[in-house]
Amino acid sequence: MTNTKNLYTNIRAHVNSHYPLLYLVTFEEHHADDLIRKLAKEDNQKIFEWNLARGVVNFEHKQRQTHEYQDLANTLENWLDDELTNHFLIIKDAHLAMRENPLVVARLKALAQKILHDSETKATVIFVSSQACIPPELEKFITLFDLPLPDQTRISAVIKQFVDAQGDTIAPKVLDDLTMAFRGLSEHEITQLLTRGYQEDSKLDSNDVELVLQEKEQIIKKSGILDMISTVEQFDNVGGLTNLKAWLKQKAHILHNLNEALAFGVEAPKGVMIVGMPGCGKSLTAKATASLFKLPLLRLDVGSLMGKYVGESESNMRRALQLAEAVSPCVLWVDELEKAFVGIGSGGAGSEVATRLFGYFLTWMQDKTGAVFVLATANDISSLPPELLRKGRFDEIFYVDFPTRDERENIFKIHLQKRNQNAVIDIKKLTEKTDGFSGADIEAVVKEAIEIAFVNNRTALTTESLIDVIGSTHPLKEIMKHKIKEYEDKFKDLKIKSAS
């Protein structure tokens, strides 16, 4: 994430180079105001502001400048007619003001052209908004900037300022715990939570970390772009996959002792990609991993991020990944990764958006600072860009194949015990009959056999009844015969580490 000093220098360079439209994406308007105020002071710029709530206002005290509310279209018309010399023209709530308003877009375009081509006009339009919304007509004129959330140094300073204001002190360990917990939140959110924690018992301690986690869960729910998955799946419920499970247990040990591991020189785990056959435990492993790590599980559906406006999809992606870092430490599950970035390099508008999303995701994977363990699952990786598969993106890539005989035996035991079926079942006989069955196929067999036993006057489940169901079941390997063969050949060529 760009630090504040570099961001200011970058924006200053754009202002000096007469870029007409700058777009600041932030939830904290007062920080944007501070930045604009600093920019204006250096060059003695005049600041005019329009916001959606009050119309044209005084930039410093936000009082309305006209007796009647003036909409943005009329304000822009006035600005087009004015002599603009050393002006910053600020538009707040820009994404709402431009949406479905062609007159506003047309006048913004005219204003951008006036700034570019009229030598007498020296002005910069600065949009301030919580999310990016760039109509196609303005795409070539706008430069987008994300205002960073506070880093650990700033968070620590905010906490200390709050404690000093209360005339109190804070233990170093509590300060470290709260600083880590507040990562990914805005200063406004941090201050609110500090106030709430202090009001409850007139002190700040490590118990207040729980308040932060509750607030982060609320943020996820309100965002609508990530799902927080409540999972009760335990790691012991994952049958087979011995290599993968041993690897994940090693990462769990690091995460449970992260500070000591970092001090020892161990790098924080980045994530894992699990590829392979459908129904063979990839999604189950994602859920069980969150339980093993004792971390919240967030699911990212890249398809839900797509927006109709230029820059909206990318803004949603940025927000989703910022939220993941806000909730960190956590597990971020990107399901069916191959569908997320489909069409890259094929040309067309959809391909351009997918390419930009992919580029942002790769950069974030490489540079992320939050303790976000990315668990990506995919069936078909033949369509994935090779950049995603190289070392450095994920710590490891595992291939999940159809379960072996021993793994099928383990899977049968898990599903029978899970459903309280304690009758004497010849599991070895069942494994002989289920060569080529996936874990999902085996679960379906057990569920159907139990259902039939219940319907037939609750007779006990038997080996024979399970074999009858097996005989009438067409496993996925049979149904998707040609596709499965294609997957197997591809995974063999890539020499990916086996999960079993």
Image (cartoon, rainbow, N blue to C red):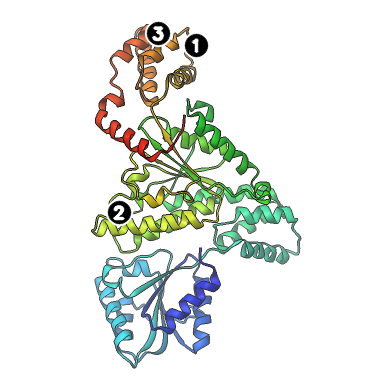
Closer to viewer: mark 3 or mark 1: 3
Q: Which mark is residue 422?
A: 1
> Can residue 432 be seen here?
yes
- Residue type at mark 2: give it: Ile
Q: In the image shown, does 472 or 420 lie closer to the viewer?
A: 472
Q: Residue under circle 3?
A: 463
Above or below, 24 against 363 in this view is below
User: Of residues 216 and 119, which is closer to you in this image?
Assistant: 119
Q: State the separation of the CA atoms marked 2 and 3.
A: 50 Å
Q: Give the spatial CA distance, label 1 vs label 2.
A: 51 Å
State the image coordinates of residue 237 (x, y, percent, origin top left). Answer: 50, 26
Task: Name the residue: 41% across, 75% down.
Answer: 54
Specify the quadrant of the image occupied by residue 168.
bottom right
Q: Please give the residue where the numbered disc 2 appears in the rendered image.
A: 344
Assign a secondary structure to mark 3: helix
Residue 187 placed where, x, y %?
Answer: 57, 63
Is the residue marked by circle 2 packed among few (<14), some (14-19), or many (20+) residues within 10 Å?
many
- Alpha-carbon neighbours of circle 3 within 10 Å: few (<14), some, or many (≥20)? some
Going by the numbered disc 3, the residue's amino acid type is Thr
